[in-house]
Image: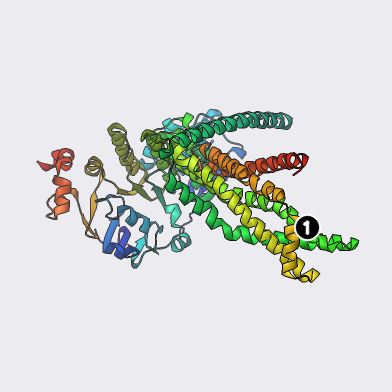
Amino acid sequence: MTEENSIISIKGLVTQFGKQVIHDHLDLNIYSHEIFGIVGGSGAGKSVLMAAILGLIPIKYGTITVLGKHVGSLEKIRKHNLQSHWGVLFQGGALFSSLTVGENIQIPMKDMENMPEDLARELAFIKLKMVGLNEGDFFKYPSELSGGMVKRVALARALAIDPEILFLDEPTAGLDPISAAAFDDLILTLRANLNLTVVMVTHDLDSISRLCDRIAVLVDKHAIVGTLKSLLNNKHPWIHEYFHGIRGQAALSGLME
Amino acid sequence: MTVHIPKIEMFSQKEMLIFKPKGLWVAKYAKEASPECEAVFQKKLPSHLIFDLGDLGGFDTSGVWLLQRTIKALEQKGYRVEIKNESEAFQSLSTRIDPFKPTLDKIPEQMSFFQQRLLHLGKVSVGIVILARELIIFLGQVTIGSISVIFHPRRLRLTSIVAHIENFGVNAIPIIVLMSISLGLVLAYQGEEQLRRFGAEIYTINLVSISVVREIGILITAILVAGRTGSAITAQIGIMKINQEIDALNTLGLNPMEVLIIPRVIALVLVMPLLAFISDIAGLIGGGLMVIFSLDISPQLYITRVGESITIGGFWVGIMKAPLFGAIIGIVSCFEGMRVEGTAESVGICTTRSVVEGIFLVTIADALLSIFFTNIGI
């Protein structure tokens, strides 16, 4: 793989809050049609990295290129209309609490793509069922849903206009193991059917081993990128502890042999 | 450059009609693709139709669904539809969508305008009765809570009360002073205009001092506090409820009544008389500025006349109302905060209601007290 077919490319990214530096000249390339995992300790800047790509926080130095367009601020992202090329699943779902589930899913279709009303409603139904929910949930409000359902609705909204890139912030956090596994399956099928590139921030080692083609580990304000196999042999103490600790061993036992 | 806009081209072949969709059938062009599909039904069609998908430039769920929906509708009307040159990707997406086809089309039954209005009126009326009932229950809870705190002073949260006093009281002084001075000015200016016609402009001083001290000072304070502090209390408690902070307090064995509500109500009760007093002074200063310049009297004379026109009773009538108004605002805003449910919209609704109800109840109480005090001759 070369830089030419990278869908997201980050060069020399520096972000900081006040005096606290989060990323110090971080480089990263994400290629088309891969599932790319971002892991790291709490406070290592995983979510901040995603927010920087999405233009939600200002970046200090460096360049971020998405689909060949220079981004780095919301203005530039709006100019290139990149919002209709990606979908985002936020950690807490971030559903609009005053709208029903159906209206939440229809928002990107109606407001960004001006779809006809009937088509938007039918597609919202299709997406809702794609993520494993029922027709009856269509008219519910987010406050009436369980945590797992909120995540699914948020995924349906992120997928509403068939984006090329899907950003997932801790998609399986807070789900029971069965739902989490079902969620992983869902991501895999969706990628196969919809030609998605998936960028996911996660702590879930099971998800990582099942889904991710490549992984970036955020340590010491940099990103160490590799496949799961190559990272297993990495000698960095945090990475070693992460994959060879008790939980890592349990989740990855199949791969270690 | 290839054409992206989706189109359906048609060719006649013997007895059959061939539809050839072209362009990008994606969400971005769905608004162009949708009428293309509808146009199919406008034509007079032979019984045998063919969809040739060989020239499809690209597609996603929306495009696949649009074509599938059209084909399904044609089949239902009795046409024989054949699909040709379907790519593998199209087929796989198409089969994924198929079992998901939306069947439910739930649109709530429409009522007539008259029925809707009647229903609305009923709902609002019942709502007011329920609201009054809940408010009275809440008033009872606050009273019981306050009494139990008085008997167990160690449960009184002094630090919290002091912090609230600073927030609700000290920080509100500038705006209250500003508003009261300008109201005093306006009152003196208009009063003098009228009284001059009778040659009684000197009584402007009585007009200003009595109305400011008895009514205006405390009322403007209450309105400002309801708008400034009442809304803040409702929004804060409401968000705490959404964030489950209230639940957290309950599970930690802390009573939200004692931790959140009573300190706020007590702080408001303590701080309102002080604010009302400051407002009185500022109002008198504002009125004085106008009177001194336009009537050309000395400040000393103004102060003496003010002292003569205000009785001790009149002063206390104004100040005595302050703690009551503070309690009303505090209880209403905490009550509305606790009524917030789940959504961001509900925070907005409850905050609006908190301010409206607070000012409404304060005005009613003021009117009743005004009649009462005048009748007993103060």
> Mark 1 belongs to which amino acid?
Asn
Residue at image location 58% in from the left, 40% down from the top: B332
Q: Residues within 10 Å of mark 1 (few under 14, many from 20)?
A: some
Residue A103 appears in view: yes
| Coordinates of residue A212 in the picture (x, y in percent) | 25, 46
**Direction from residue A223 to residue B292 in the image, left or right:** right
Residue B84 appears in view: no
The quarter of the rendered structure image containing the C terminus of chain B is: top right
- Chain of the residue that carries numbered disc 1 in the rendered image: B
**Direction from residue A171 to residue B338 in the image, left or right:** right
Colour scheme of this structure image? rainbow
Query: From the viewer's perspective, is residue A60 above or below residue A174?
Result: below
Query: Where is mark 1, residue-wise?
Result: B206
* Residue sitting at the far right: B198
Q: Nearest the camera: A176 or B290?
A: B290
Query: From the viewer's perspective, is residue A51 above or below residue A14?
Result: above
Q: Tag 1's secondary structure?
A: helix
Query: From the viewer's perspective, is residue B319 above or below residue B303?
Result: above
Q: Nearest the camera: B250 or A125?
A: B250
Residue at image location 86% in from the left, 61% down from the top: B200
**Direction from residue B253 to residue B118 in the image, left or right:** right
| Coordinates of residue A85 in the picture (x, y in percent) | 42, 53
Q: Nearest the camera: B80 or B100?
A: B100
Quarter residue B39 falls in? top right
Quarter residue B35 falls in? top right
| Coordinates of residue B193 in the picture (x, y in percent) | 84, 63
Numbered marks: total = 1
| Coordinates of residue B124 in the picture (x, y in percent) | 66, 32
Residue at image location 73% in from the left, 63% down from the top: B304
